[in-house]
Structure formats: structure tokens, C-alpha cells
Image (cartoon, rainbow, N blue to C red):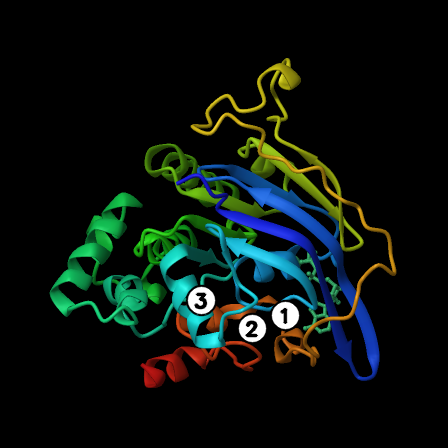
Amino acid sequence: MTDPALEAIDLTRRYQLEGVSVEALRGVTLRIDQGEFAAIIGPSGSGKSTLMHLLGCLDRPSSGQLRVNGVEMSGLSDTELAELRNRTIGFVFQSFHLLARTSALENVALPLVYRGMGKAERRERARAALEAVGLAHRLDHRPSQMSGGEQQRVAIARALVGEPTVLLADEPTGNLDTRNGAEVMAMLDRLNSDSGVAIVLVTHEPEIAAHARRQIHVRDGLIELDTSTPSPAPHPETNPHPKSAHPKPTTHPERAHSEGGDAESGRPEGDHPERDRPEVDHSERDHSERGASFGTGGSETGDRSREEGR
Ligand SMILES: Nc1ncnc2c1ncn2[C@@H]1O[C@H](COP(=O)(O)OP(=O)(O)OP(=O)(O)O)[C@@H](O)[C@H]1O
Ligand SMILES: [Mg+2]
């Protein structure tokens, strides 16, 4: 496949909150090639999560275009978009967002339900995904019976069970101690090199960002720096993709659109219920894995509603 995994062109996202407009993204152009491993870093409030949600088709831009494997998103209905997301994108959140009363195996198998896959195959694939993240011995454990690192690995298995093109992870080690964080990163390194899934992760930690071959710095809703060079490389400019199976340059010149440029969004953006609750809130959009997730509010009990919604 030669299309980029993700291609964002001049994406903007403006939120309206109590009459106040916030330009969270002000024109981001970004291409993620198949098999890439990129880290997004930047100050709190700079727009990292907003960008991830757009890239992950969990949200729609105010303006701009997004293509996933060459398919333009803007013309798709929410249902079509969710279906495409289910097949092409895995999303991992800082706080795992597993169904609390459900076994690891069933958590991981859930996205496959929406594909109409039979139970035996779902279970087999989920078992294989858990094995791939080193949790073959934890199939029947519930999240509360696992460590944070194990829970995040279950979440990664769930994100990968459908064999997506790209895995998006918003601060996947943010809730983990150093050792568990290192384990999760080792896992992501391995998955990227073995299975070729492209990975884009957000992190505040330089050591975590150093796992990626490319670093994308976001500030004030714009990409201020985008490099495909690994930070510890001695001569980065001569070997931008040492491990990549796709040696062509992965970066697009980022158009740091200055403010104001954002044209009107094609769609009116209401405030997001999620914003009221931080981070956790994105959960259910995440794994509802089927449509109708835009703009839905939710909470941890979203787990239940998701189950009901199945
Ligand atoms: N649903 C929303 N409604 C209103 N404003 C929002 C919403 N989501 C994000 N914002 C605002 O958009 C800006 C970017 O937020 P975003 O969550 O993308 O930042 P971030 O870089 O992920 O920050 P952090 O590192 O703290 O997670 C912030 O000013 C934030 O307050
Ligand atoms: Mg964030």
C-alpha cells in the first residue's frame, strides 16, 4: 500500500465553550507513512489530544482534510467513519478505558463484535493479540486484577486486534510507573518493527519520545518542528529512517499557518462534553468502535452503555 497511513491537510479545530471560541488547532498539515513511529510532544494545552482525536477520526475538524489510507474522511457519515476507524485505527488512552467487569479476553475481542465476526474467531484473535503483548496467562483476568502496565497492554491488544494500519496512543505511559512504562514502550517498539503498524504517540516525557524515529513538536495549535530523525542519532540528517521500511521522507513541510487563517469550519462545532471531564472522557468514543460516538458524552460508566449498545 503506497498511500500514507494518515494525511492531514491544514486541519483546524475550534471549540466553542460558553460563548468563548478556542482555536485548539490552527492549521496542521501532517503525513504519517505506513510503518512510521512518531512522537507528538508539546506543552499542555497545545492541541496534542485534539490532533490525535482528529487523526483517529474520533472527532471532526472545523476545516481541513484528513485521509486515512488515501480515503478522504469528510464525505463519510458518522457510521461510515466509525466503520472505517474500526478497521484501520487503534486508539490507546492514558487511562486504559477497559471494561471493568469484563475479562481481558472479552475486552480485546470487543472491537471485532462490530465487524460481525463469529464468537470463536473473535476469541481466537483476541487470544493471539493478548499473547502478542505478553499476556497469554491473563486471559480471564479482569482489569482490577491486573497491574497498570498489564491493563495498558490489554488496551494495546484491543487496539491491535483488528489489525489496524495505525495505532494512536495519547500518553500511553502517563499513568504508569517507570518500569511499567518501559515495558509498554518495549512492546510498542516491537509491534512497530514486527508488524509494521504505524504508531503515533503523545508524551510529555523525552525518554518516551526518544523511542520514536520522528518527533513532532506542537505549540499553540501548530506544528512548530517536525523531524524524522531519532534524537540520539549521531548524524541524523544522513539517515532519517534507519529502521523504516518506507525510506522516503515521512515529513511534510509543515505549514505553520499563522493565526487567523482558519477558514470557517464546514461544520458548527459545539462544545465537547468531554472537555468537562478531562482525558477519561474520550474513552467511550474510543471503543465504541462504531459510529455515533461523536459528541456523545460519557463517563466511566460509558463502559456499561457501550455494553448495552452492542
Ligand atoms: N472539548 C473542548 N472544548 C473546549 N475547549 C477544548 C476542548 N478540548 C480541548 N480544548 C482546548 O483546546 C486546547 C488544546 O487542548 P488539548 O486537550 O488538545 O491539549 P493537549 O496538548 O492535549 O494538552 P495536555 O498535554 O494537557 O493533554 C486547550 O486550550 C483546551 O482547553
Ligand atoms: Mg492531551
Residue bearing the label numbered 3 = 97
The Cα–Cα distance between marks 3 and 1, rounded to whole angstroms, is: 13 Å
Would you say the residues marked 1 and 2 are in contact, meaning their CB atoms lie under 8 Å apart? yes
The crowding category of the residue bearing disc 1, from other C-alpha atoms within 10 Å (few below 14, some 14 to 19, many at least 20), is few
Question: Which mark identifies residue 281?
Answer: 2
Name the residue that disc number 1 marks. Answer: 278
Callout 1 amino acid = Pro
Residue at (46% x, 58% y) in the render = 91
Q: Secondary structure at mark 1?
A: loop
Relative to residue 15, is residue 189 drawn left or right?
Answer: left
Count of marks overlaid on the render:
3
* Element carrying mark 3: loop
Cα–Cα span, label 1 and label 2: 6 Å
Give the x, y percent position of residue 100.
Answer: 36, 72
Judge whether residue 155 can be spotted in this image.
Answer: no
* Residues packed near mark 2 inside 10 Å, few (<14), some (14 to 19) or many (20 plus): many
Cβ of mark 1 under 8 Å from ligand 1: the answer is yes
Measured as percent of width and height from the top left, residue 186 is found at: 42, 36
Q: Quadrant of residue 23?
A: bottom right
| Residue 85 visible, this angle | yes
From the top left corner, tell me how far across and down residue 77 is, in percent.
Answer: 49, 75
Which quadrant does the N terminus fall into? top left
Mark 2 or mark 3, which is nearer the start of the sequence?
3
> Callout 2, which amino acid?
Asp
